[in-house]
Image (spheres, rainbow, N blue to C red):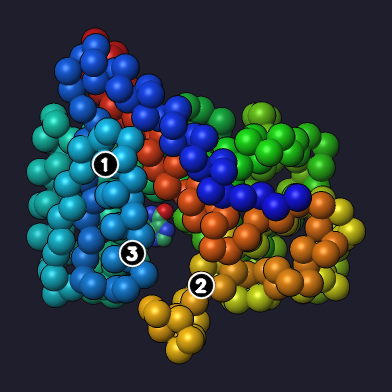
């Protein structure tokens, strides 16, 4: 089965749009996401443009703040403080990676936890670990929604996550070992220092590949019938395409798809669900900020 992100994302987006219309009609306030983009990294430009476009499509307001890559950490912190105290802004997102002279940790900690729609603030990560109400980072959230859409339970299964980033691998490993719908499995977290990674992978009922090496997961590394979630989105030069590059996942789709019972394509898979995770978090932030009182 192809785990088509276009289908799952379209269904989720329609529900978000309907809920937003209801809430806006009732409260006369529109959910508002502020996205900060530092510099002009090509991939980041594309992601942020897509986030902004999707916000508009479901009826949110969005503000894109562009800063030069020479911006100081203090200037960026001041921009965040302003958004923190702006009652009209429900969610704040700082696109990563940031230029080397800026501490990502300092920036993430400066975002008020109630507006941290990326779910990267240490307080929100701590809440995630403890199974408390929080903002689930967008990509792991999107993957859970994908599993839910295609009715792929993980209860009692063995999940192997490859990659230990704060954005995907680490939170994904925690979610897949939680006691929540679709995240209720035994988890092995593999990374660059894992010995004999293939032998771990072969044990997996569900593989989540999030290491950023194109075509890394081969058919010899996966069990017959495994579910394969490909988080990779590496740009590889391809002069035959209009853009001059193509997007390659972490899984060798051609061969692994013959063995897998279900697999996400790249592009058109997890990437589209990441946007859904962000939209759901923004709506959640809005509801918590406006409807609590
Ligand atoms: N860079 C890569 N993925 C993400 C993400 O989910 N959020 C942000 N802010 N930056 C990213």
Inspect this view and state whether residue 123 appears.
no
* Between 266 and 83, the one nearer to me in the picture: 266
Q: What residue is shown at x 75% (from left), y 50% (from top)?
A: 1
Which residue is the site of mark 2? Answer: 247
Residue farthest along the right direction in this orientation? 224
Q: How many marks?
A: 3
Left or right side of 135 for 22: left
Q: Secondary structure at mark 3?
A: helix
Q: What residue is shown at x 59% (from left), y 76% (from top)?
A: 213
Left or right side of 273 for 196: right
Tell me, for residue 239, which label it has, or none: none
**Residue 241 in the image, given as x and y percentages of width and height:** 45, 81
Q: Residue 54: which quarter of the image?
A: top left
Which residue is the site of mark 1? Answer: 56
Q: What residue is shown at x 37% (from left), y 29% (from top)?
A: 17
How many residues crowd mark 2 within 10 Å: few (<14), some (14–19), many (20+)? some
**Residue 291 in the image, given as x and y percentages of width and height:** 28, 14
* Between 164 and 22, the one nearer to me in the picture: 22
**Residue 181 in the image, given as x and y percentages of width and height:** 66, 29
* Between 200 and 276, the one nearer to me in the picture: 276
Q: Secondary structure at mark 2?
A: strand
Figure quadrant of the C terminus: top left
Left or right side of 231 for 80: left
| Whether label 3 touches label 2, CB < 8 Å | no
**Residue 120 in the image, given as x and y percentages of width and height:** 40, 48
View quadrant of ligand 1: bottom left
Tell me, for residue 46, which label it has, or none: 3
Q: Between marks 3 and 2, how big is the CA–CA gap?
A: 12 Å
Please tell me which of labels 2 and 1 falls first in the chain: 1
Q: What residue is shown at x 17% (from left), y 18% (from top)?
A: 28
Q: Is residue 136 above or below residue 161?
A: above
């Amino acid at each position: 089965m192809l785990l088509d992100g276009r289908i799952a994302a379209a269904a989720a987006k329609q529900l978000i749009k309907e809920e937003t219309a209801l809430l806006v009609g009732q409260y006369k306030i529109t959910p508002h996401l502020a996205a900060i983009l530092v510099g002009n990294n090509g991939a980041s430009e594309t992601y942020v443009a897509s986030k902004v476009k999707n916000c508009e499509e479901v009826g949110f307001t969005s503000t894109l703040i562009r800063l030069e890559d020479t911006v100081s950490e203090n200037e960026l912190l001041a921009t965040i403080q302003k958004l923190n105290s702006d009652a009209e802004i429900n969610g704040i997102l700082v696109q990563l990676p940031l230029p080397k002279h800026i501490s990502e940790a300092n920036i993430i900690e400066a975002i008020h936890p109630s507006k941290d729609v990326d779910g990267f603030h240490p307080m929100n990560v701590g809440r995630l670990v403890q199974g408390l109400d929080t903002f689930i980072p967008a990509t792991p959230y999107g993957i859970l929604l994908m599993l839910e859409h295609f009715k792929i339970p993980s209860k009692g299964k063995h999940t192997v996550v490859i990659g230990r980033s704060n954005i995907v691998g680490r939170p994904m490993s925690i979610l897949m070992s939680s006691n929540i719908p679709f995240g209720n499995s035994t988890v092995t977290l593999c990374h660059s220092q894992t010995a004999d990674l293939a032998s771990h992978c072969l044990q997996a009922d569900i593989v989540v590949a999030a290491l950023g090496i194109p075509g890394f997961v081969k058919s010899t590394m996966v069990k017959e019938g495994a579910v394969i979630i490909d988080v990779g989105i590496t740009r590889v030069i391809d002069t035959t395409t209009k853009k001059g590059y193509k997007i390659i996942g972490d899984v060798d789709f051609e061969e692994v798809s013959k063995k897998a019972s279900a697999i996400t394509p790249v592009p058109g898979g997890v990437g589209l669900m990441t946007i859904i995770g962000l939209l759901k978090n923004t709506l959640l932030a809005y509801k918590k900020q406006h409807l609590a009182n």
